[in-house]
């Protein structure tokens, strides 16, 4: 359990400040592990105390009960906010599913049409690859291309923003040359029969149909 907690600080910490300033999805299972470690620590200490002081053995259950109540109190104050967040996530997921289904219906009706993913933010990187997986998992074989707007590798410092620089460089290279998943953008420029999904902004206007993902997709 200690190794799990340390791994969260190592891989998801923002300058070593996990769980502060990280996306909520990176709090699991680390936060649960921290609370469970607190509860187990109470049990271990109580058990050791009962061995050291046999007269306490008859009352060790009181310590266990206090530990269990303390463990529960860690969650009670957040029940309302957790429930609200869960409901919001369900709504968000349902909306995203509807947007994807809209694209899938069009692409199935137009097997040769391309899906153009229009990016306005370097952090669209993960959603772009997720949408690719959703499309292929649905059985669609339409070509998929990326178009980036308003940013490039030159928008970021290679030294102080190495991750952003790398993501932007990768997306720009895919836009121009494609790869095993995406086709080069220029191969789709002569076709207006396309569906465009705007990730964090508007879709490409030249496509016959499209929608905006950013209004329903939360990066967190």
Image (tube, helix red, strand yellow):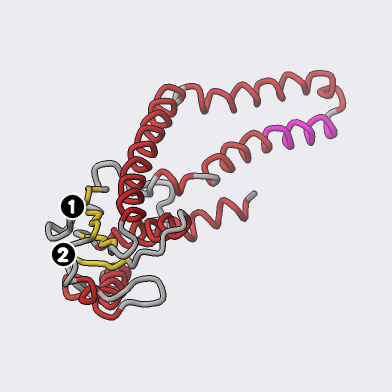
Between 86 and 11, the one lying in front of the other is 86
Between 111 and 211, the one lying in front of the other is 111
Give the quadrant of residue 95. top left
Q: Which residues are magenta?
A: 42-52
Q: Is residue 166 above or below residue 43?
A: below
- Camera sees residue 1: yes
Residue at 77% from the left image edge and 21% from the top image edge: 61
For disc 2, the neighbor class at 10 Å (few under 14, some 14 to 19, many from 20) is few
User: Residue 24: where, in percent of width, then height?
Assistant: 41, 43
Between 191 and 196, the one lying in front of the other is 191
Residue farthest toward the right in the current orientation of the protein: 54
Residue 199 left/right relative to 126: left
Predominant SS of the magenta segment? helix
Give the residue pinned by disc 1. Answer: 201
> Which SS class for mark 1?
loop
Residue at 47% from the left image edge and 45% from the top image edge: 27
For disc 1, the neighbor class at 10 Å (few under 14, some 14 to 19, many from 20) is some
- Camera sees residue 159: no
Give the quadrant of residue 115. bottom left
Is 177 included in the stretch rendered in magenta?
A: no
Q: Is residue 47 above or below residue 76?
A: below
Give the quadrant of residue 71. top right
Give the residue pinned by disc 2. Answer: 149
| Cβ atoms under marks 2 and 1 closer than 8 Å | yes
């Amino acid at each position: 359990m200690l190794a799990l907690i340390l791994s969260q600080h190592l891989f998801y910490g923002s300058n070593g400040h996990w769980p502060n300033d990280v996306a909520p999805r990176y709090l699991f299972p680390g936060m649960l592990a921290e609370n469970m470690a607190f509860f187990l620590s109470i049990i271990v200490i109580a058990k050791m105390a009962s061995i050291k002081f046999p007269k306490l053995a008859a009352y060790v259950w009181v310590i266990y009960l206090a530990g269990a109540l303390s463990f529960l109190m860690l969650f009670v104050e957040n029940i309302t906010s957790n429930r609200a967040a869960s409901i919001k996530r369900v709504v968000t997921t349902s909306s995203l599913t509807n947007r994807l289904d809209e694209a899938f219906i069009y692409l199935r009706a137009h097997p040769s049409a391309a899906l153009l993913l229009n990016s306005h933010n370097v952090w669209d990187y993960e959603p772009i690859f997720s949408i690719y997986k959703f499309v292929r998992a649905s059985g669609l074989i339409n070509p998929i291309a990326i178009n980036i707007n308003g940013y490039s590798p030159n928008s970021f410092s290679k030294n102080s923003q190495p991750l952003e620089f790398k993501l932007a460089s990768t997306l720009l290279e895919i836009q121009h040359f494609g790869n095993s998943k995406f086709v080069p953008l220029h191969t789709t420029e002569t076709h207006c029969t396309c569906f465009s999904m705007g990730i964090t902004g508007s879709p490409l206007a030249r496509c016959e149909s499209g929608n905006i993902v950013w209004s329903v997709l939360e990066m967190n």
